[in-house]
Amino acid sequence: MSLIDISSNLLLIAFFAYILGTVLIAGSIKRNDGAASRAEKWGKAGIVVAVVGFIAQLGYFITRWIYAGHAPVSNMFEFTTAFGMFLVGAFLLIYFIYRVKTLGLVALPIAILFISYATMFPTDVTPLVPSLQSHWLTLHVVTAAIGQAILAISAVAGLVYLLKEVDPKQKSKERFWLEAILYLFVVIIGFVVVTLTFRTMGYEAEFTYVDKNGMEAEIVYNMPALFGMNEYELKTDGVMEPLVELPPYINAKKLTTVVWSFIAGTILYLLYRFIVRKRICELLNPLVKKVNTNLVDEIGYRSVLIGFPVFTLGALVFAMIWAQEAWGRFWGWDPKEVWALITWLFYAAYLHLRLSKGWEGRKSAWLALIGFAIIIFNLVFVNLVIAGLHSYA
Amino acid sequence: MEKVKCVCGHENPFGTKICGKCGRPLTEEAKAQKVLDMKYDGSAIRSKTYNKSIIDKIWNFFSSVKVGVSLIVITLIASSFGTFFPQKFNIQAATEAEKALYYEQNYGTLGKLYYELGLSDLYNSWWYQILVGLLAISIIVASLDRGIPLYKSLKNQRVKRHESFMKKQRIVAHGPVTEGDASKTLDLIAEKMSKLRYKVRRDGNALLAEKNRFARSGPYINHLGLIIFLFGLMLRFIPGFHVDEAMWIREGEIRAIPGMDGYYLENEKFILETYDNEPTRAQIEQGVSKIAKNYQSDVKLYKQPEGAVLGDTENLDLVKEYSIRVNHPLKYDGYSIYQMDYRLNEFKSMTFGLTNKQSGESLGTLTIDLTNPEKEYVLGENTKVEILNYYPDFSGLKDGIPQTASQYPNNPAFVFKMITPDKPEGEISFVSIGAAPVEAGDNEYKMTFKNVETRNVSGLAIKKDVTIPILIVGGIVFLIGLAIGSYWNHRRLWVQQLEDGTLLLAAHTNKNWFGLKKDLNVVTEYAHLPQYIDQLEENDETKREGDDVE
Amino acid sequence: MDKKKKRMVIRGLILGLLACAIIYTIYNSATKDKVEVLQDGDKAPDFELVDLEGNTHRLSDYKGQGVFLNFWGTWCEPCKKEMPALERQYQQFKDQGVQVLAVNIAQSNFEVQNYVDQLHLTFPVVIDKTKSVMQAYNVGQLPASFLIDPEGKVKRIPPGELSEQQIQTYMESIKPE
């Protein structure tokens, strides 16, 4: 078996370990009535499995690094998987400080989602263009990802906090938004499901179109085209014609993917509602019932405190040093840079509100979720839609 | 200025919430609280104290955290607007009009609006700079207003605090010792707390154990770092504080380096390397057949000797030979030269043969250096080719006269005079690329194109930034302050042995109550103290997760 | 000074200083394109270039004479239109202490010689092979002219192509007294 195969297998092991870990932790909470010691064992087992998964993924990371000759954070697949790994790592760190297993119930599934999302992108090792061949860049990307992962734990804590505090039976704005967030997670599952479905079917539709510079270009859709590129012409027989043609400055292929994900996610969500007849937040509420909300609130705050300096170092300081080395300017107002600055400003506002205005508890939890949304926006949207120096893939 | 006199006799500055000496709550608001608001240890935030003149009002405006946070949020939202479409300085267009057109062509009406609103150059706009400036004022004023009183209050704090202060702390304990001799309790506490690296001070029947007070300075240090950083950024706008130039230099050329007076650069070679890997899926999807591996300019850096004037390139001193690559700029004398761009295969020289049209007989070949053509090329006895005119970048005829669009040999054209033994008076021919030669009469000889040699051009950027050290200092100070404020917490434990023999304990930390409680658990067990309660914790639940921490 | 007044002064000073800093920054950023260009009254940067015959011309050697410095290239259409007028005025003024120095931008001797021959130019034509003089004088578009007075100071920088009338007036203005 070659190194790259070992690497892929380790990632697979990690993936299943995270799933098993989630199940075990959920089991420990469900079984808490009566057999307390047995529940304890389930919980411990869950953490052990998660640690095993983390080590396996670390193995994936290192072997891939050796194989590729550069840190595996250079394309969308590699970065997103690494982010999932650091998220698990951050969860374990916080777990060993605070011993709150319930956080794993949110953190592990998010990591699972990230890794699944990552594998929808090309997974082969790509050689590095000259500007990316820099130790500062490696340091920048890895530190920034660790910082973001620790910050994301505050959103995990925030979600746990809200799942407990927001009454799922009482109609409220908070309940609506909480459910909306959970629905968005289902949409990501939807994305994975449609991508896999059409990939297994081997769906391909080739188009030619006229790009924004007026040049003829080709594009291959891997999903039935809902939207056509500017002045498209379908080249493959027996596949669906696009419903609408879009102007040249919108990438109709990406929009098609997004809409398909929402369609699939919505169907999944409705199916779930039809079968279970409960909101997701209502389903999850009992799982977090035993959580000490004050402690979860403090964990949320603490992870921002721990993560913020790491993020600053990685996403701003190392980024500036690299930019200075590569381009001779430490800051270029590239969209990715600006969104790192926005993330930084946002958490700065979070800390000030918490310190001086006493925004704790619910307000803090919502802020943490918004912060996470900004991080995700920066990872997904800015990388894929707004092109800049950092646009991977 | 009026003072607030506490019952204990201590005079506090106006606006103080908690007496600096004994800790009694001073304001009605503080008296009514179940748990005291310990922000800034209850010291008077200066802005709250005076509000008289216009200067005070402006000052107080900037001192407010609410204003500070609002400014952060406004800056954050404003910054995001700049990412909708590319910024102007990233667009490859020469003139302002072309840039305006770019937005409209690429992004439609929205793009046009974006350009017209000035969002296409948002980060250089006056209002964005004002926003950052206001943020800087807010940071300075708010830090001065809070930092100084907090520092004074922490410096002057006394061991013994009033009961009302202690009972209004978030963590309190009151009761007899659970075991052993109560007279030794304070010694035990002092011993254990010292072991936990607390500084212990005692005053009669009272004890104060304190740890990491310096952590309170963290926010002020990081704000100082930010201000140094912003100051450095401000200096960058002053002319002369930073050099930002670009140059194109061909292989074999020596050029004066723009912005770097007295220095000359010779480009020996530009190298482009690509990977020879099988195209990956990502490459195929993007239609990229080859991925670049290396961009490199091998250069020699020369310096003029002392006292030499501009243009005097007689005695240049070689100071450095270097291969400039991306991520590996040439650094010298505070300047850095970066590999930024390249152009491949610009014409360097052309070789022609002089041939007889009919017989095809060749009378020899000549190679013309396109950047330094000779007047004539002698091929043999009575045989030579003269260049009458040379158009390096032939762009067509105007009034019958050939024109050149630039000085660069992009499309060379020549007027040759061919002198041969047959035609000693010479035949004239106009030769350009891709077109049949234009001849004055019916020539017997012609110039046949043999081959062309090319060379590459390096695009380099020259930068110097004397503000970088300031930015580095600002960044380091900021990070140190951030680490101090985030990774260390200021913890305090007050203990008093009351007259009835019971103990009154209170504890406070600015952050991380969980960590404080861990310390308290240790000392409670060791000194048999009454169990503390967290007054903010709801007590209606039984065992919860996280409570079972060792 | 009483405490209240002192407080006012300190606060006023800090705020005033910060306000000035902001205004100064905005001013600098708004004018950043216009600075660093050589301006009227500045000392003309000295240089040394070689002409077609191999003679070295140093600007400071012409001290005591007015110098009409002209940057040009063979590809530049307006330069070509300007040259004959410059030549005529040179003939008028050369005995009155006004020198013309035409600086070609990094072209080959052949091209420059050809051009000089075709236009019958008699004033010194030097070639700025390394573009150092062009950079020091911040020459962007061609032609570019600089009027240097007998003291070696830049008297005027007329923009773009000049008419014969203008050339005459300018040469008049840098005539030594």
Image (spheres, helix red, strand yellow):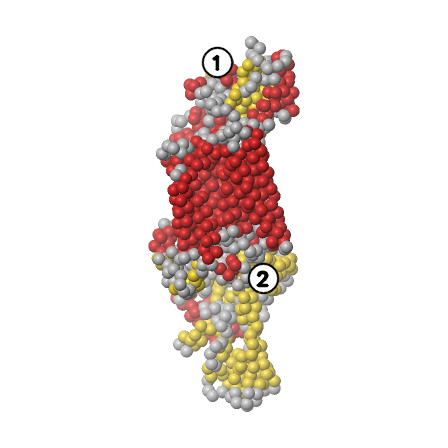
Which numbered marker is on residue B403? none
Image quarter in which the C terminus of chain B is found:
top right
Mark 1 residue element = loop
Q: Is residue A34 above or below residue B345?
A: above
Q: Tell me where residue A256 sits by quadrant.
A: bottom left
Which numbered marker is on residue B7? 1
Instruction: Tell me the mark number nearer the camera, choosing from 1 and 2.
Output: 2
Q: Tell me where residue B330 sits by quadrant.
A: bottom right
Image coordinates of residue B170 in percent, x first then y, are 50, 22
Image coordinates of residue B448 in percent, x first then y, are 53, 81
Task: Count up the numbered dots.
Answer: 2
Image quarter in which the N terminus of chain B is found:
top left
Instruction: Kindly identify the amino acid type of the residue bearing the numbered disc 2.
Output: Asn
Dot 1 or dot 2, earlier in sequence: 1
Instruction: Kindly identify the amino acid type of the residue bearing the numbered disc 1.
Output: Val
Neighbour tally class for label 2: few under 14, some 14-19, many 20 plus, Cα within 10 Å? few
In the displayed orientation, state which residue is furthest to the top. Answer: B500
Q: Residue at x 58, y 33 (%)?
A: A41
Say which of B170 and A180 sits in front.
Answer: A180
Q: Chain of mark 1?
A: B
Give the spatial CA distance, label 1 vs label 2.
Answer: 83 Å
Say which of A25 and B280 sits in front.
Answer: A25
Q: Chain of mark 2?
A: B
Whether residue C59 is visible to the viewer of this picture, yes or no, is no
Report the side of A161 relative to B468 (left or right): left
Image coordinates of residue C82 in percent, x first then y, are 43, 69
Q: Which residue is mark 2?
A: B277
Q: Residue at x 47, y 84 (%)?
A: B439
Q: Is residue A345 above or below residue B178?
A: below
Q: Is residue C86 above or below residue A143?
A: below
Mark 2 residue element = loop
